[in-house]
Amino acid sequence: MDLSSNLLPRDIRRSEVEITSWFLRVVPGVTPRHVVDPEFWAHLAGKLRVDHRIEVVAADGSFDADLRVVAVDTRGEWAQIRVLRMTLAEPADLPADQWPDKDGYRIEFSGPQKHRIISPTNEVVASGFPDEAAAVAALAKIKAAKPRGKVVLVTDAMPMVGSDDPSFDLYGETITAKDGVVRNAAGSLAGSALDMASAVRNTVHLVGLPLDEAARMASTYPAQWLGIDGLRGRIAEGQAADFVALDRDLQVSATWIGGERE
């Protein structure tokens, strides 16, 4: 190694700066790659300052690390981290029930308060779960679900869906929707205020099915059952150009009827 005289230190100073240290035990599924991602610290960035030290220990024993904060977003939405030390566990030290499971599925941590289900073909099946337990429960439902093409979404929607008026008359009775529940004047259930877009959203967020499968349950499979799949149920040449665009939250952002935007 070339150590020319101009590279050698000639002075050293005692540090008189108070250093703040933090300790964080991370949940199973968090990896070293996650802790160096600035967005991983989104919920804690407001507490962090440049030069703060963070000791990170994985609850599953897979790694531990010493980190230094080198930059913090002024809005407290991220923190840039530099690794001072990283120690990885030997493979034999990892828990015996480590993912993937016997069917090839695995649960991954994907950001603060976010877990996702990965298929045996390495595709994201469902995401956005607040913790591993919620993702595991959703995976169990996915595995127990009927084969594709055997379940369709039905709204049983009443006339107030898509209307600004929450009430309508039916056989001389006034039917009213309140907080998503449709009742008659006596308080008995009288239908549904569920729209199909909400049904798709519920299937993804509550049941945990992939968006593409939820969309087929709302369009392709019903069209096949009704025998009109030659004209409806898919976005393809020769099909009726009736479809919607959804945003990231699966809310309807635009609608097309007969190819014309509404």
Image (cartoon, grey):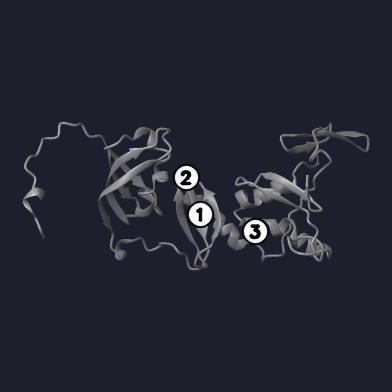
| 1 over 131 or under it: above or below | below
Looking at the picture, tell me which residue is in the foreground, 150 or 119: 119
| 59 sits to left or right of 144 | left
Q: Residue 31: tell me if it is visible.
A: no
The residue at the point 32 percent across, 57 percent down is: 62
Looking at the picture, which amino acid does disc 3 mark? Asp
Q: Residue 131: tell me if it is visible.
A: yes
N-terminal-most mark, 2 or 3: 2
Kindly identify which residue carries mark 1: 116
Element type where label 1 sits in the image: strand
Q: Which mark is residue 113?
A: 2
Looking at the picture, which amino acid does disc 2 mark? Gln
Q: Which mark is residue 188?
A: none
Residues at marks 1 and 3, CA–CA distance in whole angstroms: 16 Å
Tell me the mark number nearer the camera, choosing from 2 and 3. Answer: 3
The residue at the point 32 percent across, 45 percent down is: 81
Residue 214: x and y in percent read: 67, 56
Asked if disc 2 and disc 3 are in contact, CB closer than 8 Å, the reply is no
Q: Which mark is residue 212?
A: 3
Looking at the picture, which amino acid does disc 1 mark? Arg
| 110 over 170 or under it: above or below | below
